[in-house]
Amino acid sequence: MRWYGWMVGLLCVACATSGRGPGTTVDDDEGVGPAPKEETVYRVPAADAMMVVRQLLEEQRYDVLEREDGLEMFSSAHEPGFNHPGSRSFERYYVKAVPVAPRQTVVRVFRLVYNEQSDLVETSMRGMGSRARELLLAEESHPFDANKTYKTAPNMQGNRLMELDDPFKDAPGMERFRMVRGGRDLEIERKLLQRLEMVPSLEMVGGNASVPARSLVLKGWAEAGEEAPASQAECGAPLAGVEPLLAKGGTVLLADPLGTRELPAAALRMMCDAAAKGLAVTLAVSQPAAEQRLLDAYLASAGTSQDAQELLGGSSFWRRVHQDGRSSGAMLWLVEQARRLRAAGHAVSVVAFDADQGKGNEREAQMAKHLLEHRAKHPDAWMVVLAGGTHVRTASVDWDSGFEPMGARLAKARPSVRALDVGFTRGTQYSCRYTVWEDVECEVFAISPTKQARHMTDIPAGVKLYPEAHEEGFHGRLYVGALNASPPALQGSSSTASEGGQ
């Protein structure tokens, strides 16, 4: 591993500043202080977490030395400011990873500060010549020398004397310094959290179907020939603030995160409230339109395990090799709840609106087309649509002027469309993401909200509408608290699926 010397920071002639000290408050609103209140356990292998820390440091132009076990790293050093030899301060990073489980890791990032004046306090009295020699040495070298040597000034014959030293011999005691101050760098740790947990989910469009639909049993389902399954939908607790959205012909778009239990549960509660008002209800799910025949058949069935077998066994969507949150156990549970509402006498339909193939604008156009076609047949129905956050935006995106989301297309045709973002606290989600190694991985990941989407303790659960739509095209936010992952309904060798995706 290459080790470079030092990176020059801000040039400040003859000043004694050493930049931000360790533990400096970065952002009071972010809750960042001199020490974390609790450790964050990242749901990734230690190697993945450390690779992201390496990237963060290298982006700031630090070089990184890694221990052989990969659980410790030191960065190169820099001097924030410029002082005379003997009065200099240097900063570098020390990172320690602690594996808790194969996919759970604690990472601590420390900013270490070395001060030459502190070092001199601990040094015994020396002769004038010895001190002068050290100052000459300091003028021509840096304490963290790339060549593992300290170079003196030329002697009387013009030769440069060399004093060998190993910069990493006593690490983490850190080279020739006897004193070092350090503290947690919560700014770097916050950026690590963002890189690992505030990332978009991938939707796996197409793909082969190979997961078998074995004898599947969901709580409340009955075997063929046995007593009929429960017909009462599990509507759950009421949602505050949803009433203004429950109007004849209304459309509500619910954003990510799918792959959780909370979003399908909130959608069901809205459906129950709309049905109780006597409205016809449409549940729109992000499944390929080719699945519509199977969904219609299941909705009209008695809901036995045999009916579930026919729904899943004839589907290529539920049995994909790489599944994302759209085929979670909670989404299958939601389809079953829609069937129960219909069995109880309510006018309920389910529409699959996603594209079988296609991407970008082509896919957005197909999704909007499928929903508008269903809307034309059911103009008075109240509709709730579950899709990814980018899809449901009713405004254009700022990263691609030519991209028009599905929500924006729907809003043009029906201005009454309302889109809700989701507010939550840190939890888990089943999703597909790119790893730091640029592979696609579908797994249970931790997920953290942005500052704007954080569900604060003083905000009640439910819907909070904005006075006017935000620039992203959202008309309000649905607050759901902590998120809990819902894995796929069918998982390889798994033969059961539990209610709500548990």
Image (cartoon, rainbow, N blue to C red):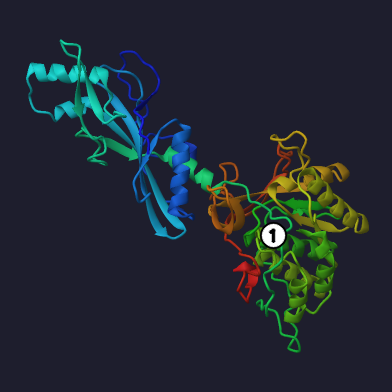
Mark 1 nearby-residue class (10 Å; few <14, some 14–19, many ≥20): many
Regarding mark 1 in the picture, which secondary structure is present there? helix
On screen, residue 336 above or below 179 = below
Q: Nearer the viewer, residue 277 or 325?
A: 325
- Residue closest to the eye, 158 or 416: 158
- Tell me residue 218's x, y (percent): 66, 76
Residue 69: percent from the left, percent from the top? Answer: 35, 51
Residue 417 pos. (x, y %): 81, 47
The quadrant where residue 128 appears: top left
Q: How many marks?
A: 1
Residue 446 is left or right of residue 211, and the answer is: left
User: With respect to residue 488, does 140 lie above or below?
Assistant: above
What is the three-letter code of the residue carrying label 1?
Answer: Arg
Is 16 positioned to the left or the right of 224 in the image? left
Image vertical order of residue 140 relative to residue 420, above or below? above
Q: Quadrant of the N terminus?
A: top left
- The residue sitting at the right extreme is 377
Residue 295 drawn above or below residue 111: below
Identify the residue shown where x is 76% and y is 44%.
Answer: 360
Q: In which quadrant is the C terminus drawn?
A: bottom right
Q: In the current view of this chain or complex, which residue is farthest to the bottom?
A: 225
Q: Residue at x 40, y 39 (%)?
A: 33
Residue under pointer 1? 326
The answer to whether residue 32 shows anywhere in this view is: no
Q: Residue at x 81, y 70 (%)?
A: 294
